[in-house]
Image (cartoon, rainbow, N blue to C red):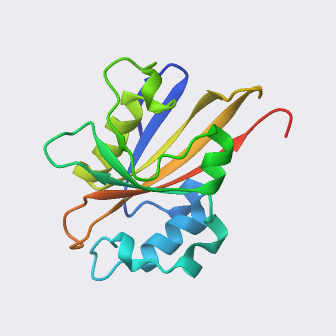
Amino acid sequence: MLWQHNSGWSYEHYPIEEDPGRFAPFESLVLLWRSKWSANRLPGWSSFELLDLSEWWGALAVFDAVEGDPYAFDVRLWGTLLVELGGFDLTGQRLAPGPETNDEDTKQITRADVEAWRRSIDDRTICMAQGPVHVELRNIGLLRYVVLPLGDDGLNANQVLYAELSEFPDD
């Protein structure tokens, strides 16, 4: 279900019960996330063991929603592959991009991105996004990500689990 299209990027939101096959190449992560459900309660970040995520090491991020600011997230984890791709580590930082999609301080994370993550939290949906990305000294490539809502209490989502894959013509 297309939610938004912005500067070559598309953001799609699906019910959390959607067939995991729809989320290829993230199907295994969606299945793992679902395995952590308990009586239809969302898993929290603490529901995962490090070894659970071995297939996704480095490609994950975890964002904590900032209460009172719908456009701000605290970065709990920014994976090593994300660091290598972008050339920066956002672990421990606050993301709060302004309305301009080219805010320099957001490290290519746009307002549309955080709006999509917020919608995953508020509506308990799975978000799939993809679009062009330019990384210094690399050609423009395709970046895809999935966002899965997490909830400390299982009922109220307050975090997202983010996984990212990229493809570049010279890879």
Q: Residue at x 32, y 34 (%)?
A: 96
- Residue sticking out furthest to the right: 170
Residue 1: quadrant of the picture: top left
The answer to whether residue 110 is above or below residue 38 is above
Q: Residue furthest left?
A: 68
Relative height, residue 137 to residue 150 (above, below) = above
Q: Position of residue 65 (x, y in %)?
A: 27, 51
User: x, y percentage for residue 147?
Assistant: 44, 52
Q: Which is nearer the eye, 116 or 93?
A: 93
Q: Is residue 167 above or below residue 124?
A: above
Can residue 3 be seen from the camera position used here?
Answer: no
Q: Quadrant of the C terminus?
A: top right
Can residue 45 be spotted in the picture? yes
Apparent side of residue 27 relative to residue 122 in the rendered image (left or right): right
42 displayed left or right of 2 = left
**Residue 25 appears left or right of 139:** left
Q: How many marks can you see?
A: 0
Question: Could you say which is closer to the camera, residue 25 or residue 63?
Answer: 63
The x, y position of residue 93, in whole percent, is 39, 46
* Front-most of residues 122 and 2: 122
For image coordinates 28% across by 40% down, the residue present is 72
Q: Position of residue 157 (x, y in %)?
A: 25, 60
Q: Is residue 38 left or right of residue 6?
A: left
| Residue at image point 82% right, 32% down | 169
